[in-house]
Image (cartoon, helix red, strand yellow):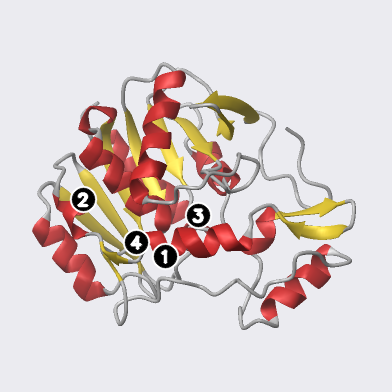
C-alpha cells in the first residue's frame, strides 16, 4: 500500500502493508516479515498501525512486527462494537488467520488496554505483554478518558488547514491525528469517524484493573515521565498488583513516548523481548 499523498512515507521498503479478511471485515496490516518471533503492536485511539514502522525497522532481523489498523481506524473496516473485548478478539482472530499460535503483544494507550485484555481472555495467544503509557484507572481524576472530537471538521481544503481546524478545537498539536489525514474527492479528511471515536473512548472509560490482574505473563510497563494518562502512583500500583511485571520510565517524554524517544523505546522493547522466554 503506497504512502498517503502529501505525507512522508511511513513504511520502509522492507515493510509491507496489506489487507486481510478477519471475521468478515477487512483489516489493514503492516508486517515487517521475516522468520523472527512475532511482536503484535496495537495502536491507540485515533492511530494507525504504521506508527510502529520505526520500531519495526529498529527490530528488523530480530523480531517480526505486525501492526494492524484496529477496527474503525485507518484503512480497516468500521465496526459497531467498541468494547475492549471486541478489540482483543480482533487481535486474537488476526493471529489465528496469520497462523501465529502466540506472540508478544505491545499496546500503546488504548492499545495497551486491548493488549492486557487479550492477555486475560486468550492467555495462550500472549507470551509476553508490553503496555506503553496506559492506566488501569481510565477515569477522572486519574485520567481524562474522552477527547471531545465531535466538532472536528469533516473536510478541509488542505492537510495543513485540517490540522489548523483541529487545533482550533483545543488540541495543542494535531500531528498525531494527521497521520490519519488523507485526500478525498471533496477535500482533506480523517480516515476515522469522529462519532466512532467518541463511542470507542467511552467504552474504555472506567476501572480496567480486573483484566490487568487476570494474567501473569512476563510484562513490561513503559511509562512516560510527563504522561497525562499514567501517573507514577498508579504505575507503581500496577506493578505491585500483577506478578512478573517490570516498570521503565522514560525521562522527559510525553504520552507518545515512542515518538519522543524512539531509540530508547526500541531498546526497552527489544531488550525485554530478548530476555523473555519464548
Residue indicated by mark 4: 134
Residues at discs 3 and 4 in contact (Cβ within 8 Å): no
How far apart marks 1 and 2 lie (CA) works out to: 17 Å
User: In the drawing, does residue 3 fall left or right of residue 213?
Assistant: right
Q: Quadrant of the N terminus?
A: top right
Is 269 placed above or below 45 here? above
- The nearer-to-camera label among 3 and 2 is 2
How far apart marks 2 and 4 lie (CA) works out to: 13 Å
User: In the drawing, does residue 16 fall left or right of residue 4?
Assistant: left
Sequence-first disc among 3 and 2: 2
Circle 3: element type: helix
Disc on res. 202: 1
- The nearer-to-camera label among 4 and 1 is 1
Q: Position of residue 49 (x, y in %)?
A: 55, 43
Observer-nearest residue: 247 or 150? 150
Sequence-first disc among 2 and 4: 4
Residues at discs 3 and 2 in contact (Cβ within 8 Å): no
Circle 1: element type: helix
- The image quarter containing residue 108 is bottom left
Sequence-first disc among 4 and 1: 4
Residue indicated by mark 2: 211
Q: Quadrant of the C terminus?
A: top left
- The nearer-to-camera label among 1 and 2 is 1
Residues at discs 1 and 2 in contact (Cβ within 8 Å): no
- The nearer-to-camera label among 3 and 4 is 4
Disc on res. 262: 3
- Judge the density around disc 2: few (<14), some (14-19), many (≥20) Cα neighbours within 10 Å: some
Circle 4: element type: loop
Amino acid at each position: 500500500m503506497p504512502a498517503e499523498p502529501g505525507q512522508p512515507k511511513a513504511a520502509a521498503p522492507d515493510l509491507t502493508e496489506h489487507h486481510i479478511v478477519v471475521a468478515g471485515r477487512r483489516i489493514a496490516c503492516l508486517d515487517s516479515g521475516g522468520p523472527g518471533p512475532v511482536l503484535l503492536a496495537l495502536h491507540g485511539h485515533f492511530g494507525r498501525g504504521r506508527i510502529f514502522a520505526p520500531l519495526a525497522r529498529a527490530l528488523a532481523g530480530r523480531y517480526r512486527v505486525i501492526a494492524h489498523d484496529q477496527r474503525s481506524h485507518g484503512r480497516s473496516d468500521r465496526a459497531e462494537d467498541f468494547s475492549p473485548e471486541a478489540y482483543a478478539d480482533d487481535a486474537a482472530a488476526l493471529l489465528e488467520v496469520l497462523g501465529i499460535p502466540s506472540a508478544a503483544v505491545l499496546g500503546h494507550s488504548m492499545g495497551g488496554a486491548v493488549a492486557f485484555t487479550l492477555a486475560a481472555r486468550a492467555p495462550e495467544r500472549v507470551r509476553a505483554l508490553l503496555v506503553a503509557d496506559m492506566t488501569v484507572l481510565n477515569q477522572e481524576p486519574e485520567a481524562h478518558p474522552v477527547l471531545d472530537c465531535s466538532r472536528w471538521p469533516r473536510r478541509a481544503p488542505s492537510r495543513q488547514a485540517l490540522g489548523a481546524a483541529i487545533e482550533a478545537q483545543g488540541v495543542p498539536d494535531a500531528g498525531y491525528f494527521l497521520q490519519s489525514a488523507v485526500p478525498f474527492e471533496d477535500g482533506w479528511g480523517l480516515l476515522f469517524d469522529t462519532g466512532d471515536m467518541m463511542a470507542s473512548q467511552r467504552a474504555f472509560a472506567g476501572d480496567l484493573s480486573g483484566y490487568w490482574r487476570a494474567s501473569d505473563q512476563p510484562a513490561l510497563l513503559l511509562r512516560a515521565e510527563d504522561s497525562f494518562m499514567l501517573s507514577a502512583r498508579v504505575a507503581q500500583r500496577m506493578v505491585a498488583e500483577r506478578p512478573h511485571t517490570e516498570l521503565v520510565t522514560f525521562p522527559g517524554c510525553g504520552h507518545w513516548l515512542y515518538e519522543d524517544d524512539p531509540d530508547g523505546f526500541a531498546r526497552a522493547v527489544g531488550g525485554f523481548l530478548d530476555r523473555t522466554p519464548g
